[in-house]
Amino acid sequence: MFQKEVKNGHLYWDGCDTVTLAKQYGTPLYVYSENMILKECQDLKEQFINKYPNTRVAYASKAFNTIAMLQLINQVNFSLDVVSGGELYTAIAADFPAEKIEFNGNNKSEAELEMALDYGVGRIIVDSLQEVELIQSICRKLAKKARIMFRITPEVDVKTHAFISTGQKDSKFGIPLAPEILYPQIEKVLQAEDLEFYGFHFHVGSQLSDNNAHLAAVKVALNLMLEVKKRYGYQIKELNYGGGFGVCYTKTDVRKPYRYFLDPVMELTEKFCQENKLLRPEIVIEPGRSIVAEAGITLHTIGAIKELPDLRKYISIDGGMTDNIRPGLYDAKYSGVVANKMNEPVSKEVTISGKACESTDLLIKDIAVPSVVVAGDLFATFTTGAYGYSMASNYNKLPLPAVIFVKDGQSEVVVKRQTYAQMIQNEVKR
Ligand SMILES: *Cc1c(COP(=O)(O)O)cnc(C)c1O
């Protein structure tokens, strides 16, 4: 799976020696290959945007939301999905064009919605009926119009971990399909002068390995579009099919190309529109993980090594659940290497453990490493680009690691390492 560049026994990432990077910037360190991010965006252009007219990609920034990343997304001309005032604030700081921002979230506050309307975001994706009234009251106050979509709960079950499944009927996300709830609301929105109704949105889940759930949800959205045309004579302008495209974390994962998910979805959409004499709306997708996950690795320095005879060997690193909570949160699997001993044969199965005071803080269970691993060696974990930095915490008062971008042998800090002083800057001494 991972095309590893190795020189002199060291792992290289986008032309940079990871051992040198660790020395220069310290560990733990998030390292992103800019070329790999750009390649993902190029794949999306070739397999979706350029192939199908009237389509758009909105990067789901919760996967990795920093100023430099959002600038890169703007540079490739994608739209942006944000889910909070903080993500929106970062987008504004990155000079991201307002009209290309979509605001998602199942419980947006009044302050967040006001910030979004004031900045003039392109879409607000409404997740509950309560939210419609809140948006309208802010529109009146600011004398603005809101461009909205309805996130629906498509009532499809997804083959992924239950913790990252979002489209099932019993979900906190989306507006239920029950006609007596949905249609009066659509009617209201179509009549409202301060609201412009664009269409429907769904997101069925994350780390998907097959397209069944997507296709089932697309059918639901298309039928809704037809029903809206029949009932109100209104042609929906836009459908948003969410994200969720799976990536490779371990050697046994097989990644499907975007076209595997998107070709059947687009064929179904085009055919449905032709058969029912509907204009094909603009189709938007919202990938997060697949754009950044594989481009990112994390570097840790190995410290304490504990051998429990006939049981297990624990190799501790200088980070863990604080910079990658996914193993502890949903038993996510990762793969990695001892980055300064790439030419040594791997033999021994060990457990890579984090430094936080939690028994679940185990980064990788049962991974083969070279038999001679000592304190000071460098461990690199692959596919940490999505939901790593963005879910990082200060638990045990560990500072947030630095983030660097690497490209063609050059490296650049995009997020500085947090200092102890910064960690307590908002604390009040009594
Ligand atoms: C998280 C999320 C996405 C992105 O999911 P990925 O699995 O990272 O592609 C897209 N849309 C919405 C609404 C989300 O909540």
Image: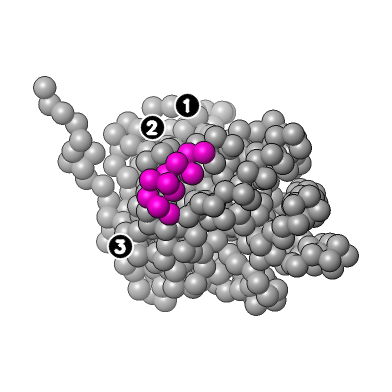
Query: Residue pushed farthest top?
Result: 430
Stretch of the chain drawn in magenta: 133-144
Residue pointed to by mark 3: 413
| CB contact under 8 Å: marks 2 and 3 | no
Question: For the residues carrying marks 1 and 3, which lies nearer the camera in this image?
Answer: 3
Residues at marks 1 and 2, CA–CA distance in whole angstroms: 8 Å
Q: Nearer the viewer, residue 290 or 198?
A: 198
Question: Which residue type does callout 1 highlight?
Answer: Ser
Q: Tag 2: Cα neighbours inside 10 Å, few (<14), some, or many (≥20)?
A: some
Whether residue 411 appears in magenta in the rendering, the answer is no
Where, by quadrant of the figure, is residue 304 drawn?
Answer: top left
Percent coordinates x, y for residue 338 in the rendering: 46, 53
Q: Is residue 8 left or right of residue 172?
A: left
Residue 40 visible in this rendered orientation of the protein: yes
Residue pointed to by mark 2: 356
Percent coordinates x, y for residue 411 in the rendering: 34, 69
Q: Tag 1: Cα neighbours inside 10 Å, few (<14), some, or many (≥20)?
A: few
Query: Which numbered disc covers residue 289?
Result: none
